[in-house]
Amino acid sequence: MLFDSGVRSGSDVAKAIALGATAVGIGRPYAHALAVGGTDGLVHYLRSVLAELDLLMAINGYPTIADIRRT
């Protein structure tokens, strides 16, 4: 299942995965980052989302994405 609605941060990605999503789309923020900062802005945004997801997983004790799905 693809989840593509209202995703803005790494915590939104984790919530979508916990609810059963196999993929998560980040359409509008992706376009905004690209428009404002070009390629560098887009890379920064994507790295920020992944870093927030990684931090959230570490704090909550989930070593892998599969562990989020099991909860």
Image: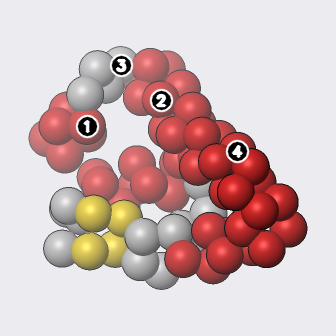
Secondary structure category for the residue under label 4 = helix
Dot 3 amino acid type: Gly
Q: Nearer the viewer, mark 3 or mark 2?
A: 2
Mark 2 → mark 1, Cα distance in angstroms: 10 Å
**What residue is disc 1 on?**
65
* Numbered circle sitting on residue 44: 4
Q: Nearer the viewer, mark 1 or mark 4?
A: 4
**What residue is disc 2 on?**
54
**What residue is disc 3 on?**
61
Dot 1 amino acid type: Ile
Q: Residues within 10 Å of mark 1 (few under 14, many from 20)?
A: some
Q: Residues within 10 Å of mark 4 (few under 14, many from 20)?
A: some
Residue pictured at 66% horizontal, 76% vertical: 31
Secondary structure category for the residue under label 3 = loop
Tell me if 2 is positioned left or right of 42 in this view. left
Q: Nearer the viewer, mark 4 or mark 2?
A: 4
Q: Sequence order check: which comes first, mark 3 or mark 2?
A: 2
Residue 62 x/y as whole percent: 31, 25
The single residue placed furthest to the right in the displayed view is: 36
Coloring scheme used: secondary structure
Q: Residues within 10 Å of mark 3 (few under 14, many from 20)?
A: few
Residue pictured at 70% horizontal, 44% vertical: 44
